[in-house]
Amino acid sequence: MVIPPIKFLPHLYADSSMTFLLESLAYAKREIDTALAYPNLEQGRQEIITAQQLHEAILTHIASPKFAHSEPAPAKARVQFPVEYAPRPTFQKLYKAECLEKIKTIESASIDCIITDPPYSQGQTSNGQRGSYKDLSMVLPFFEGLAKEYDRVLTPQGEGYCFIDWRGFALLYEAFSPYLSIRNLIVWDKLSGAGNHYSFTHEFIIFFTKKSYSPNKGGTNVWRQAGFASGALVTNGAKKHNAQKPLEIIETIIQKGCPRYGTVLDTFAGTGTTAIVCSRQERNFIGFEHDKAMYELAVKRIEEEAEKKNYFCI
């Protein structure tokens, strides 16, 4: 977990008085109490964690030999940290594997959310030109088998989000429908894009669940978030792959579709974007990537993200 800088920390190793430190402890306690009073506890979770980190840092400093003030430290100054908000470790597991085979090794009803981005427009290349497939029925059995496994591994309240474009939606609808309920077709409005026959400014996200689960989701099925052609380069850097998705659209899906500490599955992991977001958002990740170059790039990005997370330690 990356904890944001706290305004009191620069003072902790300066010549701070005990009075200042006790006032800081009181501030931390008020922050925790305020966060716990939020109607939506998830909204207050980060505030609780931040205040707890501040609280622990102050107590550590008071107890250190470097703290030479003669004023006595409080005997019982610790704030009880709510167990349900205590940070827990998460995992990111990426396998170089063919997804239809590897998914069979996943335990049934163990996945809270599927977020995946299969190759678009089967039978065509990503720029719309004819590809090597002569008949879409060649790949239909593959996706039917994958849909059957999605149904098996999802928890009873699990959700799925599958990126696709207008050329591939009909195929996936036919493949998914016998095993899963397609609840909606989300339109991701990327704000701008390239193209000569009207520009390509949107993609689809198939929202699906098990047939036995019908969640009540608020909001609309049009999500306006910048793609790489409309601002995501600033926050994501240059694309590592033509089909790479911005971190922000994956963050939106995870926040809407996966509980904290839940497990996300990506059967077409690509450059590892979903793994990175899961790490930042306190979700577990399992992913498969068959392409060697993409797998190695994803591993590199995940390792770099792990190093960044350790930049702030108390």
Image: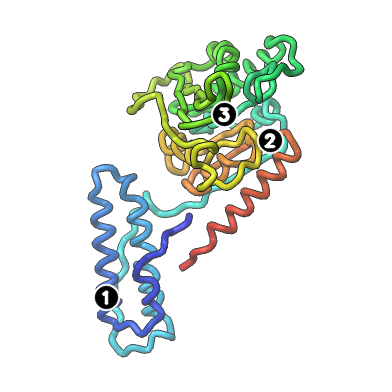
Disc 3 marks which amino acid?
Ala
Q: Is residue 211 above or below residue 274?
A: above
Q: Is residue 287 left or right of residue 131?
A: left
At which x and y percent is residue 196? 58, 22
Real-space Cα separation, disc 2 to disc 3, in angstroms:
28 Å
Viewer-nearest residue: 198 or 164: 198
Residue matched to label 3: 194
State which tag comes first along the sequence, 3 or 1. 1
Q: Quadrant of residue 307?
A: bottom right
Disc 2 marks which amino acid?
Glu
Q: Is residue 31 above or below residue 194?
A: below
State which tag comes first along the sequence, 2 or 3. 3
Q: Residue at x 43, y 85 (%)?
A: 66
Disc 1 marks which amino acid?
Leu
Callout 3: few (<14), some (14-19), or many (20+) C-alpha neighbours within 10 Å?
few
Q: Residue at x 65, y 25 (%)?
A: 119
Helix, strand or loop at mark 2: loop
